Structures are given as C-alpha cells and as structure tokens.
Amino acid sequence: MTRALTEETAAVPRMQQPAAGAAPRRRWRALRQVLAPVLLLLPGAVLLALVLVWPFLTMLGISFTDRYPNGAALTLDKYRDVLGDPYFLRIILRTFGLGLVVTAITALLGYPVAWYLARSRSRWKHLVFLGVIAPLLVSIVVRTMGWTILLGNEGLVNSALMALGLTDTPLPLMQSFWSVVLGMVHILLPFMVLSIATVLGKIDPSLSEAAALLGAHPVRNFLRVTLPLSAQGVAAGSVVVFCLSIGAYITPLWLGRGQVTVLAISIHEQMVVLVDWPTGAAASMVLTIGTFVILALYGLAFARHARR
Amino acid sequence: MTLRMAEPVSVSLDGVKKWYGSFAAVRDVSLAIAPGEIVSLLGPSGCGKTTTLRMIAGLETADEGEIRIAGQVVNDVAPWKRQIGMVFQNYALFPHMTVEENIAFGLQMQGMGRSGIARQVREAMAQVRLGGMEGRRPSQLSGGQRQRVALARAIVTRPRVLLLDEPLAALDRKLREQMQVEIRALQRDLGITTVFVTHDQEEALTLSDRVVVMEAGQIVQSGTPAEIYERPRSRFVSDFIGFTNAVAGTVEGIREGAMQVRLASGHVVPLEGAEAGFPAGHAVDLVIRPEKLRLSLAPEARPGDIPGTVRHVVYMGAVTYYHVEIGGGATLIAMMPNDADGSGPPGQGSRVGLSWRPGHMLVFPRAAAAA
Ligand SMILES: Nc1ncnc2c1ncn2[C@@H]1O[C@H](COP(=O)(O)OP(=O)(O)OP(=O)(O)O)[C@@H](O)[C@H]1O
Ligand SMILES: [Mg+2]
C-alpha cells in the first residue's frame, strides 16, 4: 500500500502539463501534506478506537447508571460512593502512592544500572544487560510466584531467619505495602533501565569530557550535563512504570495476601465478585482519569523543564 | 584586548606511550612546546594525533612517560583541574544550553559571580563575532557559528593551554581559511600555548609556529613550517606536506662533489648538496616540488637540462601545471606562474627542458612500498 502510494505521488506531478502550471501542483502538494499523516496514523487510530476508546466509552456510560444491565437513570451516585467512601479513598491513595513509590525506587535503582550499560566498555556488560532483560522473558505470574516462595511463612527468608534463631514465629513478610513495592520494583525495573539506557547511550561522551575540561567536578558534571540530557529517558521510563504499577493486579494480590487492596483488585471485586458493574466502572474511571491527570501534570512540568 | 591570559606556560611530553590493548596508538612521543607557541600535529588518519591531544587534556592516561604543563608533571592531575581549553572535532556543545549558557559554563564552574560572567561572556562573544546569538541553541547554528561558540567557550575561562582537534574539518574552504586567520590572531593576542591537530597540511603550514609530523604513533619530523616544507627528512614527510614529484633512480657514484644519479629515462643527474651520500648502485627516489622545477622552451640550448615533452597542460588560474614526460615512463610536473612574460606558455607536445636549483631536488632511499 505504501509502495503504491509513493509511486502515485511521484507520478502525478510529473504528468502535469507545464501549461496546467503551478496551481494544481500546489493544490496536490497541499493535499498530500494533509493526506500523508492521515494515512500513516489511520491503522493505529482504528485499532486504538476499537480496543481503547470503545471500551472506555462503554465503561464511562456504565459508570453513570444505577444498575447494569438494564440501568434506569443517569446518576452520579456511584462516583459519590467511590469518592465519598473512606475505604475507597484509602484504596485510591494507596494505588497512586504505590505507583509513585515504585516509580521513584525504580528510577533511583535503575539509573546507575542504565549508566553502566550505556557507558561501560567491560565485557561483563552483555551479561548485565541479559540480567536486566531476563525477567521480561518470564511471566509476571511466575516472577510473583517466586517472591511468594521467598517471602512466605515457609519461605526461604523465614526459614533462614528461624534457622538462625533470629525469630521463633515466621515474620509477616508478605501482606505489607512494602512487600508489594518490592515485587513491583523487581518486575518493572527493566522498563526503567532500558528507557534510561537508551537515552544515555545517545549522549555524546565528549559532552561530559568538555564539561570536565571546563572545570566541572564529576558530581557537577553529572548534575549539569548528563542528568538533564537523560531526563527524557527517566521521564519515559517513569511514565511506563507508573502506568504499569497503578494498573497492576496479580502482584499486589499475591504479595499483599489480601491486605494491600489496590484499585485493580477492588474493581475486579466490584465487577466479578459483587457483580456491581456501575461501581466498578466508576472506580475504573477514577483510576483512568487520575492517571491522565498525573501524566498531564508530569508532562507539563517536564515541558517547562525542557524549555528552560 | 580584554581577555588576557596569565603568563603563557610550556607543555612537554617525554617518552609518552599509549596502548589500546596490545595496539600502540602512541609510541614514544617526546615534544617540548614553548610558552605561547602554536604547534600543529599533522599526520594521516589513525597516527595518534587525537590520542596525544587527549593525553595532554587528561582525558586519556599515558601508559608511560611524563606530561608536563608549566614544568609540573600532570599525569595524575584530573582533567577538571588542568585548566585546559579544548575545542573538540565535533565541538561538543551542550545541546540543552543556549550559546550564552554554553560559554558561561566554565566560568560558573570557577565560581565567578553573575555580573562577572555576563561581562566575560559578552566579551568572548564579541571576540569570536557571535553578537546576537546569545539565546540560540547549538542546533540553531551553522557549522561556522558552532565552531565559534566552541572556541569562545574554550578561551573564556583563560585556560593555560588551548587544544584544538581538527576544529575546522567540517567547514567549507572559504570559512575554513577565514577561521584559520581568526584563530591565529586570537591565539597571538591571548599568547596562549596551543596544540592544533589537523590532517590538512596547508592548515598546519599557515597556522603554526611549528609543525609536528606524526606517523604510526611516532613523531617523524618537527620544525618550522618552512623547514618541514623545504627540507622534509623523509619521503613520507615530503609526500605528506604538499604535492611532490618523485622519480626513481640509481646512484652512479660521486663525481665533482656531486652524487650522480641515473634516472630510468637514462639521464644522469648531478645532485649537489645532497646531504646523505648513498653507495653506488643504491636505489633512490628523487623528489622535487612542482614549483621548484624550471621549464625552458629550448632544451638543446641549455646543457644541464633534462629534455622532455609536455603531455598535459593544467590551467589553474594563477598558475599552470605542465606534465612533462622525460622518458623511461617517468613524468615530472612543473608549476609555472601565469605572469605572461611574453615568451608564451609551452603548449601540449612542445619540447622543453627541466632544471632546478642545487638543493631543491631531494634524495631519499627507495622505500619498498614506494617502489
Ligand atoms: N578507544 C580506543 N580503543 C582502541 N583503539 C583506539 C581507541 N582510540 C583510538 N584508537 C586507535 O588508536 C589509533 C590512533 O587514534 P587517534 O584517534 O589518535 O588517531 P588520529 O591521528 O586522531 O586520526 P584521525 O586523523 O583519523 O582523527 C588509531 O589506530 C585508533 O584506531
Ligand atoms: Mg583524530
């Protein structure tokens, strides 16, 4: 299709008679300028509309009904339920809190690893790279399973602690917010490392050499040159990690052992267990719109930073 | 001139070596640069020019030997403490900073106050004629403008040594010549010791007090531009510095104080003042620059001349090159100014005689590769 398109676009202007002149050619060029992006974006846009916008609109509709199916009135009741209920509010805060904490920790842990991958000339580099992406090859379910084996009551950590006589009863290592953070960081770290390393790898090493010769001590050199230039990678990684972590389901469920309820778990509960679609839909909307708001704020802050 | 340097300093390298794995990128370079001198490192690609420069800057550590700045050994001094200004081959301007911020960076690192920085930046920008570009990003500048920003950024901190790594390579000829003049003027005004890397021999000759020719990680000759040009010490240097003619010959022996060399064409050429004497039978190359060959239209009239036939005439504006075949498969190219002295230039096919002043024809042992 693209081939046919380019041939056509190449052929048409040549067929224009000189007498017919510049006007049609100009019109064609203008048309092409409009057409090209439309054609390039079309397949993606269609797919997006089908798998994203359509379900979103459906859910949006459901969230304003009192019952589903066969809902009668349009109402804001369900939103009042979700946002007015301290239980739900705590879940919302916990979810976004989890997202922010996981994002911050992956960024802090991931940056040095990404730096190593981007700059090192060591031959161990490829092994480290493999180590970073290997978790991506294993399903999240399996990796979370691994953590439950490690942290469970009969798990490796507790057995070791008891064998060493440090504790008599197994410690509740799982059921906490931080055990979920631990699992999420482990699962999402590769995304952060890869997006930072990609940007770091593109930074010309002579820039920090130039800064050094201008008198910049390594710390200032990093803060003034490398960090600002790699900020885009951190931003991209943060967006990915944040979105994945606030939407996570399996890891909070298993590592939290029901004690760390996040929105995804709650939505699942509402819709599947309690079969209360409108409340579940309203909670989904809160999650989605909350994500958009946070990403928009982030984008704004970043745009201002980049303009400076 | 407002940007004045502290006392110029000397730079010296003493037996400096650098290996990359088992490959010696720089093998035994010794070089003493006087305070305020501008030296160019010249040589073919991969001969170790950049590596040498980077070792002076401290961006690369010397595996052996000592590097001194102002008499002090700096081998273990970190780059940010060396007070060196460097213009990188690709300029290495900070893309996230404006022109002004780029130039101010070094001053900020020195902890200078805001007003001082503003004044110095303004002066440096005026010096490289960049006024009005303050707010632009490097990506919004032309190649020549970027080069000026890089230069301004390197000199504004008043470094003790200025290192330039082929800073003009990316510029077109006209801009390059203009920048050469500017760099030279600036360097002289500031009196700053400068090392300039290039593989353009013309640039080396016009820009430097001293030219250092390198080959495969070693210095093969070092001297004033005139010395390097007039008295190259090897075939390599003579080939590298400017365009040369070379004809193969065999030493016949010494007669009347001159070495007699038989050319492939059968002519026997006496070489007065040839420094190195070679035993009879030795294969040599005779090398001469086109502008040192004299062309006469009546070969029979002048007994010492080598007769030949003009095969090509290449008109170049100010000068014309004449390709003269002298027999035995050898061709010498003579360059003559087009000053229209009335005799009329020899045309294609005309018989001419070639001659030269004693000492202008250089003799080098025939290198296996050059044979
Ligand atoms: N980091 C490195 N690792 C291995 N070899 C290197 C490295 N840097 C340079 N070299 C080698 O060292 C030699 C000298 O390199 P250098 O960059 O000094 O050459 P140069 O004279 O500046 O050449 P050019 O004119 O092409 O810039 C080259 O053969 C190069 O391949
Ligand atoms: Mg180089």
Image (cartoon, rainbow, N blue to C red):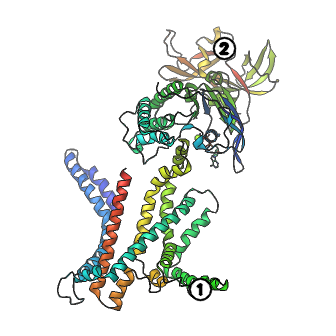
Q: Is residue A177 visible?
A: yes
Q: Is residue B190 left or right of residue A284?
A: right
Q: Is residue A143 left or right of residue B149?
A: right
Q: Is residue A43 visible?
A: no
> Which residue is painted at 71% across and 41% down in the image?
B17
Q: Where is B298 relative to B231, above or below?
A: above
Q: For the residues marked 1 and 2, what is the alpha-carbon distance in whole angstroms?
A: 95 Å
Closer to the camera in the image, B9 or A28: B9
> Which residue is painted at 57% across and 37% down in the image?
B84
Q: Between tags 1 and 2, which lies in front?
A: 1
Image coordinates for residue A249, horizontal then vertical, percent: 42, 81
Residue neighbourhood size for the residue with mark 1, other residues' Cα within 10 Å, grouped as few (<14), some (14–19), many (≥20): some
Ligand 1: which quarter? top right
Image coordinates for residue A208, horizontal then vertical, percent: 53, 48
Closer to the camera in the image, A243 or B101: B101
> Which residue is painted at 39% across and 76% down in the image?
A95
| Residue position for label 2 | B357
Label at residue A155 = 1
- How many marks the image carries: the answer is 2
Q: Quadrant of the N terminus of chain A?
A: bottom left
Label at residue B332 = none
Residue reaching furthest to the left: A73
Image coordinates for residue B57, horizontal then vertical, percent: 60, 40
Residue A81, picture quadrant: bottom left
The chain carrying label 1 is A
Identify residue type, mark 1. Gly
Identify residue type, mark 2. Arg
Q: Where is B37 relative to B81, above or below?
A: above
